[in-house]
Amino acid sequence: MRYPTYRPRRLRQNEKLRGMMRETSISADCLIYPVFVKEMSEREVPIDAMPGISQFSVDGVLGEIDDVLGAGVSAILLFGIPEKKDATGSGAYDRNGVVQQAVRAIKGRFGDDILVVTDVCMCEYTDHGHCGIVRDGYVDNDETLKLLAKSALSHVMAGADMVAPSDMMDGRVRAIREILDLHGDYNIPVMAYAAKYASSLYGPFREAAESAPQFGDRRSYQMDPPNGREAMREIALDIEEGADIIMVKPALFYLDVLKQARTEFNMPLAAYSVSGEYAMIKLAAEKGWLDLKRAVIESTTSIRRAGADIVITYFAKEIGTWAKEHTL
C-alpha cells in the first residue's frame, strides 16, 4: 500500500469516521475509583496533594458513593485510615475497623449497585508506616502473611466483594486464598498488585492515606523500577497462588510492563494510574498548560491500549461523566 493510492487520512476526516476506526475504547465499565475513608469527626477533608480528592468519614463516604454511581462508575477501591495506629497494625483486621465499618455501611445502603474492592495492606495501620510486621528493622514476610490473611477475611466478613493485596509480601495471595476458602468464601475474587514498583509517584497517596514510612523505604519488598522480566515472574507466582486478576502499578511509567503482561498472561489485567500521575495532569491543567479532558482521555486510552482490562484511576468520575456524553 503506497501513496497516492493509499491515503490513511481518508479515514480521519470527521468524528464519525474516526469513531468507526477507533481500536481502543474507554467506558465506565472498565473503571475503578479509589476512595479514602478515615476515622474522624469531619465528614470530608480535602487532600492538598490531590486537588479534587478527599478523605471521608464512614458517614460522609456514602455521599461520595452517590456521586460515583451518578457518574456511571460502579466499582470502588477502598483504603482505610484508622484513628490510632500501632506496631502490629491491629486496625487492619479489627472487625470494627474503619474499612470494615465503611464496607458494611456502603453495602447496606447500595447493595449490589456498587462493587466494593478493599485494599489489603498494613501501611495505613502501622505506627512505623511499613507494609508488615517489623523485626530488627526488617519487615518480617511470613509473620506479616498471617495478618494480611486475617485482614482480608475481616473485609469479606464485612461484605467486601473483592480483596486486593498491595503489600508485595511473598506468598500473600496464597495465604489470603487459603483463609477465604477455609471460611467458605470460594467466590470472593483476589485482585493482586502483582507487579508493584517502588515508584517515585506515590507521594500524594502517602499524604492521602497517611502512610509514609517512618524510617527507611519500601524497596526491600516493592519492585526495583529497572526490572521488567522480574515482573513477569512476580505475576506468574501470583497466578499460581490463586490470583483472579493481576495488576501493574504504576501505569503510565510502566506501559511496557503492562504490554508484556498482556502478551504473556491470558488473565484479567488491571493497571493503577497512581496519585502522582493524577497530580501531574491535574496541576498542569490548573496552570493552563494542557487540556484536562484531552489529557485524561489520552493517558487512560494509552493504558487500555497497552492491554489493561481494568483501569484504577482518580479520574474515574470525570471519565464516567464524559463517557455518558459520547463514546470515548
Image (cartoon, rainbow, N blue to C red):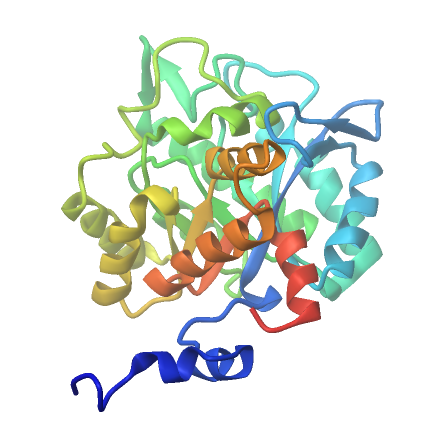
- Answer left or right for 324 relative to 290: right
Q: Quadrant of the C terminus?
A: bottom right
Q: Residue at x 24, y 87 (%)?
A: 6
Camera sees residue 73 = no
Q: Quadrant of the N terminus?
A: bottom left
Q: Residue at x 46, y 80 (%)?
A: 13
Quadrant of residue 171 in the image?
Answer: top left
In the rendered image, residue 311, in percent from the top left (x then y), is placed at 49, 56
Pick out the residue farthest to the front: 4
Residue nearest the observer in this picture, 290 or 182: 290
Pick out the residue farthest to the bottom: 5
In the rendered image, residue 3, in percent from the top left (x then y), is placed at 20, 83
**168, above or below 315, in the image:** above
**227, above or below 236, in the image:** above
- Answer left or right for 122 relative to 216: right
Q: Residue at x 77, y 45 (%)?
A: 64
- Answer left or right for 98 relative to 122: right
Quadrant of residue 37 in the image?
Answer: top right
Q: Residue at x 61, y 50 (%)?
A: 33
Quadrant of residue 92 in the image?
Answer: top right
In the rendered image, residue 192, in percent from the top left (x then y), is placed at 40, 50
In the rendered image, residue 158, in percent from the top left (x then y), is placed at 69, 47
- Answer left or right for 286 relative to 120: right
**71, above or below 204, in the image:** below
The number of numbered badges drawn on the structure is 0
Camera sees residue 132 = yes
Residue nearest the observer in this picture, 115 or 143: 115
